[in-house]
Image (tube, helix red, strand yellow):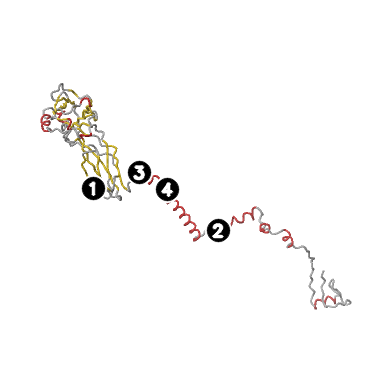
Amino acid sequence: MAVPGASLVHILLLGLGTCLAASPSPKGVECILFNEEYMTCTWGSGQTLTANYSLYYWYENRLPVVECQQYLWDRSVRIGCRFEQSEIIQFQAFYVRVNASCNGQTLEIPSNRMELQNLVKPEAPVNLTIHNMSGNQLQLTWSSPYPKEQCLEHVVKYKSNKDTSWTNQEVKGDIFSFPSVDYEKYYTFYVRSKINNYCGNTQLWSEWSVPVYWGNNSTSKGVAEEQLQWFWIHTVLIPIASCLLLLVLVVLLVRMERVWVIIMPRIPNPSKNFDDLFITHNGDFQEWVGVPKDVVESFKPNYSESICHVSELPSKEGYGRLQDNGTHLPGVPGQQEHGPYKSSYVGA
């Protein structure tokens, strides 16, 4: 509950010197009673506070004034006070006073009268459950952690997957009936609560409950199931698809390499084919190609030839002169020798 009177605080700060003037004054005190279990009173919301603050409280017609027992801190500066259930009294006027002090100077920041039953903020409803009724009717039930359920009123917020805006429905009890549903739609429901006018006068609503879902032929789909689906998509399907794509690219690359080899064949290097000829067979081609030894021996020559001496006979004139001189060539018959030829040769 915000307390007005900030203008008065600023006027008082003007006379407290530079220390308090440099520290922004709190914008009143705001108290909230959470589910009737504990209460917090805070000041200076959204501001940077530097002075030392103290809170004192009392109830109307009840003394004495008591200082806060559990301060709330932010960066070594007091920003609020926590009250336990034993310190809380409803339906009695409640007052607080905040003192801001710095260098021995003190400023009292009073608050207006508060009624704690008007400051109750219940916890959010729990255990939301959807029941399928006759026909196309649904029934939504829940429970509340607030100890006085008869003091609560509720609002149900729902929307289907084909709607563009939320629908809010006020409910007095803890049962909400949905008269007609479309089995082709997927619905989401939330519930929140506040104290009704019979137990207090407040506009402090609880937080929205955890959602509950209904749809797809009466099959509820929770957040956990959707998260599980996304888990499988992100951690299983996407990595598998990536691996398959990489495998396809590798196969295509290999096939393209083979096509490239067919289109542009490499020039062969025949030197390796002749290593055995020169290393193992010492250059023997016939042994390298595997020609049998008997065939090789058959091609070798196995005969011998004698030497033939050839002499040239002299001409007639020279032969006549030799006869006149009474000489003749060796191996050539003279006049007393007769042969079948005029000239002859001796051969082996």
Q: Quadrant of residue 43?
A: top left
Residue 24 horizontal/vertical position (percent): 16, 32
Q: Residue furthest top?
A: 64
Image coordinates of residue 63 in percent, x first then y, are 15, 21
Image depth: mark 4 or mark 1 in front: 1
Please state which amino acid type lies under the numbered disc 4. Ile
Classify mark 4: helix, strand or loop.
helix
Q: Which one is in front in this view, the residue at disc 3 or the one at disc 4?
A: 3
Badge 1 local density, few (<14 within 10 Å), some, or many (20+)? few
Where residue 173 sits in the image (x, y, percent)?
22, 38
Q: Which residue in the structure is indicated by mark 3?
A: 225
Q: Give the residue number, with chain letter if any, for mark 2.
A: 268
- Drawn side of residue 105 relative to residue 138, left or right: left
Which quadrant would the C terminus be assigned to in this image?
A: bottom right
Q: Secondary structure at mark 2?
A: loop
Vertical placement of residue 231 versus 41, above or below:
below
Residue type, mark 3 in image = Glu
Q: Mark 1: which secondary structure?
A: loop
- Amino acid type for the residue under numbered disc 1: Ser
Per the image, the residue denoted by label 1 is: 165
Q: Is 274 or 77 nearer to us in this picture?
A: 77
Q: Quadrant of the N terminus?
A: top left
Which tag, 2 or 1, sits closer to the chain's start?
A: 1
Q: Earlier in the sequence, mark 3 or mark 4?
A: 3
* Front position among marks 2 and 4: 4
Identify the residue at image location x=48%, y=56%.
255
Q: In the structure shown, which secondary structural element does the residue marked by tag 3 occupy?
A: helix
**Label 4 sits on residue:** 240
